[in-house]
Amino acid sequence: MKNYAIRTIVAVGIGAALFFVCGRFIAIPCPIPNVTINIQYGVLAFMAAAFGPIAGLLIGLIGHTLIDFSWGWGVWWSWVLASAIFGFVMGCTKKLYKLNDGEFGTTQIVRFNVSQLIAHIISWGIVAPALDIIIYAEPASKVFVQGIVAGAGNIVTTAIVGTILCIAYAAARPKKGSLKEEQ
């Protein structure tokens, strides 16, 4: 149990740092105000798939909070919480992928991408817009457009970046049962 906790803490630190760097410095402009296309969700999806829901939640929460602080406009909590929920949902589905067993074939790729699609729809189609309305009294027509555009971009970038990271990680892991005892 102690090794699991240390592993999770290290994953959160590395994941939040990667999420921050990707989100702060590799944001692709979008014509919708206050929306960018981001690759950090591919990193978050991969980290959550490898290290679980608590790591995913904390990476999304800490990483997105740091991004907002670094821009100087304050923290936009509705979107920070949506990032945390995305990471949590992806972590909850990690058993579908067998990523840590060194397997990530066609079946796991499909499962990963269906999971990330659902997690993005929940985060950007429901959570972020609803919290924008509740917390910030933003107009529904504005925040749902922002959420849908951001979610669509995140789905595409997660499908590309997240899938590549998972394939590379699984390829670097020993296959389950591949180690044999020498005589």
Image (spheres, rainbow, N blue to C red):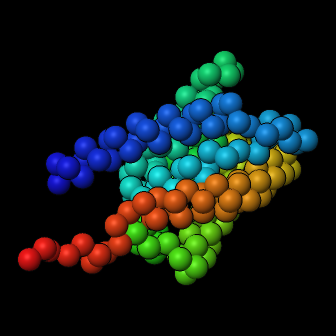
The answer to whether residue 67 is seen in the rendering is yes
User: In this view, which residue lies farthest toward the right?
Assistant: 31
Q: Is residue 121 left or right of residue 170?
A: right
Give residue 113's quadrant in the image: bottom right
Residue 144's place in the image compared with 70, above or below, is: below
Give residue 22's quadrant in the image: top right
User: In this view, which residue lies farthest toward the top?
Assistant: 72
Q: Is residue 81 left or right of residue 151?
A: left
The answer to whether residue 127 is seen in the rendering is no
User: In this view, which residue lies farthest toward the bottom?
Assistant: 107
Q: Position of residue 35 (x, y in %)?
A: 79, 40
Q: Position of residue 3 (x, y in %)?
A: 20, 49
Quarter of the image with the N terminus in it: bottom left
Residue 1's place in the image compared with 60, above or below, is: below
Q: Is residue 151 left or right of residue 75?
A: right
Residue 66's place in the image compared with 137, above or below, is: above
Q: How many marks?
A: 0
Q: Nearer the viewer, residue 179 or 140?
A: 179
User: In this view, which residue lies farthest toward the front?
Assistant: 183
Residue at horizontal 20 percent and vertical 76 percent from the top: 180
Residue 138's place in the image compared with 44, above or below, is: above
Residue at horizontal 47 percent and vertical 52 percent from the top: 47
Residue at horizontal 64 percent and vertical 55 percent from the top: 161
Q: Is residue 100 left or right of residue 22?
A: left
Q: Position of residue 167 (x, y in %)?
A: 53, 64
Q: Nearer the viewer, residue 93 or 145?
A: 93
Q: Position of residue 89 (x, y in %)?
A: 50, 61
Q: Nearer the viewer, residue 130 or 44?
A: 44
Residue at horizontal 24 percent and vertical 52 percent from the top: 4
Quarter of the image with the C terminus in it: bottom left
